[in-house]
Amino acid sequence: MLSTFTDSPKNLLQDFKKNKPTSHVSFSCATCNYCYSVCPQDISFKELFFHAKKEHAQDISVLKNFGYKSILFHQKNSFSKLFTAKTKFHEGKYKHMAFMPGCALSSYSPDMLKKIYTHLNEAMPGINVLQQCCGQPTRIVGDMRRFYELYAKLQGDIKAMKVDTVVTACENCYMSLKEYSPSIKVVSLYEVLADIGIPKERENIYSNFEKVALHDPCPTRYESNLQESVRKVLSLLGISYEEFTRNRERTECCGSGGMLELTNPQLALSQMQSRANQTTCKSIVSYCQSCAESMSRGGKNGLHILDFVFGDIKSKEFQQKRNGVVMKWYNRYKSKKMVEKL
């Protein structure tokens, strides 16, 4: 991103001091915070660009130049009764907890969500399910007024369910809850799986699967316990994997961060291809569905770790289904109906 607009971070920072960055520059930030992770002066361009985006977002006509109509469509439907659901069980040791799969995963595979819940409920009887959005798209483009309105709905659902712990499968949901709901305990699904184990029939069955590369999602770059848990799950599965040179706290964005696919599609695709080609492995595994899809768009075989734990991988040729927009919404509706039947 920096090389697109300047020849050095220092010059970009000097531009900040002289002028507010243009909207095109501001909305080209992937908000991945990679720059901060390597900056010797601990400067976060993510924060600088975020403040700029909040100023730009006060003029809705500016946002419309960066795909905001699509974001509003997504958020309106994501928080509608048609695509949201929650349970409230009154029995079971874990009735104080709720599993929140997130938008991308529920759009990918309702059958997988059912298998995940079944496995969780066997080990943690009474755990609830919350199919809801965290409002991250509106926050990431700086429309904080709308974000707080939407996030209040999520908080209302959590309060109505009377749960004090939320288990997330989505890294954006994980970080949103951690920052905006400090009274709620947030746990990653992968930390839970590392603790309770994976289905017995999946243990060590992928020892003959070709080596894969592991991509760490950028939102949780500093969540070391989560990262270790993912690697433990891979070991339980028997998967041979290699690390990216830039991994963990210095991981690179997959290209979909910051709603970049809407705000700067060309830059998004360029980053997807750049990241995907940082490994010679044909398949790249992540624990974020958006990252998995980005790696496929970048030219590799993008997979989610849950494809191995709960999916239908039967051979080395397995590829995720390329769901279109309509199918993704249909899958979310099916996920909602599945939750309502629990």
Image: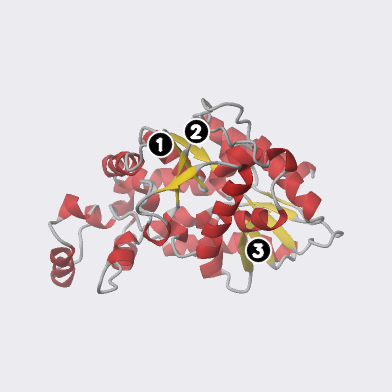
Q: Quadrant of the C terminus?
A: top right
Which of the 4 image quarters holds residue 43?
bottom left
Q: Nearer the viewer, mark 3 or mark 1?
A: 1
In the displayed structure, does residue 8 sit left or right of residue 150?
left
- Residue occupied by mark 2: 210
Instruction: Inspect the image, locate mark 3, and give the three-letter code of the amino acid beneath it.
Output: Gly
Is residue 336 visible in the rendered image? The answer is no
Instruction: Inspect the image, locate mark 2, and give the three-letter code of the amino acid beneath it.
Output: Glu
Q: Where is residue 217 in the image (x, y as percent from the top left)?
A: 45, 52
In the displayed structure, does residue 237 sit left or right of residue 337?
left
Q: Position of residue 320 (x, y in %)?
A: 52, 31
Residue positioned 16% across, 72% down in the render: 17
Asked whether 185 or 339 is in front, the reply is 185
Q: Position of residue 21 (x, y in %)?
A: 20, 62
Mark 2 secondary-structure assignment:
loop
Spatial CA distance of label 2 from label 3 is 45 Å
Sequence-first tag of 2 and 3? 3
Q: Residue furthest right?
A: 91
Q: Residue furthest front?
A: 208
Disc 2 residue crowd, few under 14, some 14–19, many 20+, Cα 10 Å: some
Spatial CA distance of label 3 from label 1 is 44 Å
Sequence-first tag of 3 and 1? 3
- Residue occupied by mark 1: 281
In the displayed structure, does residue 237 sit left or right of residue 16?
right
Q: Which mark is residue 156?
A: 3
Disc 3 residue crowd, few under 14, some 14–19, many 20+, Cα 10 Å: few
In the displayed structure, does residue 98 sit left or right of residue 307?
right
Disc 1 residue crowd, few under 14, some 14–19, many 20+, Cα 10 Å: some
Tag count in the figure? 3
